[in-house]
Image (cartoon, helix red, strand yellow):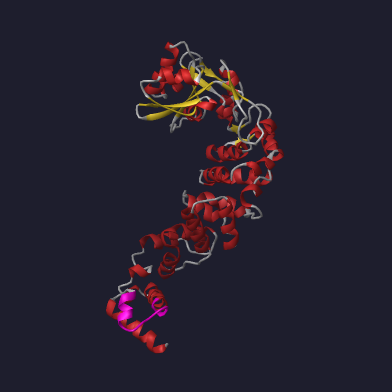
Amino acid sequence: MRDIHIENNIPAHIWDVCHRFYSAGEDAYIVGGSLRDIMLGRAPSDFDLATSALPQRTAELFSDMRVIETGIKHGTVTVIVGGAPVEITTFRIDGSYTDSRHPDGVSFTGRIEEDLARRDFTVNAMAYNDRSGLVDPFGGRDDLRDGIIRAVGDSRRRFSEDALRIMRAFRFSAQLGFEIDYGTLSGAKEQREGLANIARERIAVEFLKLITSKEPEAALTLMTKAEALTYITGEYRPSERIFSLISKMPCDEGARLGFFLSEASEDAARSVLRGLKYSNALTTAALAVIRGSRRAVESPADARKLIGECGAYARSAACASVLLGLSCADAPLWVEKNTAPTSLRDLCVTGKDLMEIGVTGKEVGRVLGALLAAVIEEPRLNEREMLIKMAEDILNKA
């Protein structure tokens, strides 16, 4: 049955692609996350199509456009339509899995139902076109309505084929605010050891998507119950308080990651971040939030100190400290409104100025640090003449 709501929310250029397949005697359907999002009333970021055409045939049909064949071995080509990439994959059946991630091979089929049967969750195992309407052999539409993440078929088999699907189940639960079906959760727990075979970078990406989602608390709690969290953070176990408060942090990767790790020692946190192979920039942000989350900010002067220590991440650190009960509610606002000096580059003197009055070697850094501490406490002192006088006093007392 055709659904006008779905049909009208699919862009004209996607229908143009489908109709080109129809004219060539082939089938084509909108599939995956784009269809799911449309059915949820959300705007998809991109579109995936499945077709009965073999990949070489797809490339031929769109030879007048830019075609990228990087996934052609597994049946996928990307066609640039109107400046936007459209990923098109031949209906396929996956072979056996021996690495807990990728099929050893694929075979092509002429039936969309067989293609949908290999997918992870029912809400992602639907297809739609304007000839056949919605193809939904596993009850995905009902699960969307009821807010349930349910594996297609036997969950143990789905997760043994590709253990990253375990992470995806928790991530979808967090992003969509859906419950995870009991059988699916049980399958995830039973097959959790497969996560040890997944590249850390892939796990790290899924985990970031989860904790920066709108409702991560329930998903994090379920991960703990399924004993899957150990494959992300090792021995570190945040308290339920962290789970319940993390959604109140700014929706920023560094802020959320730092808050999640705020109960770990800095060395332990660094070990988790290194194990997940996060970038230096993200690691720096998370560690700054962790340090700042342990500082009490009860005045604008405290806020300036926090900025001096955490730099660009000070507001997130202040938010974390407020949530953990160390700082007053105004702390993030004080950070935002601060215009006082907070770093050495803000001082009205430089190392060269200090050397001109006789400060040498390592003493330059020590004196600059003392001057910065003084102006953070009292911003009006940040004038060149005052700072030079203070530096001379420090030298005389040395």
Query: Could you say which is closer to the camera, residue 122 or residue 267?
Result: 267
Residue 244: x, y in percent?
A: 58, 50
**Chain part drawn in magenta:** 351-364
**Which residue is situated farthest in the right direction here?**
190
Q: Quadrant of the C terminus?
A: bottom left
**Which residue is situated farthest in the bottom direction here?**
396
Residue 194: x, y in percent?
A: 67, 40
Q: Is residue 353 magenta?
A: yes
Determine the residue positioned at 64% across, 26% down. 95
Q: Is residue 238 magenta?
A: no
Determine the residue positioned at 46% across, 57% down. 316
Residue 171: x, y in percent?
A: 56, 40
Residue 86: x, y in percent?
A: 43, 27
**Residue 94 to residue 224: above or below:** above
Q: Quadrant of residue 370?
A: bottom left
**Residue 89 to residue 292: above or below:** above
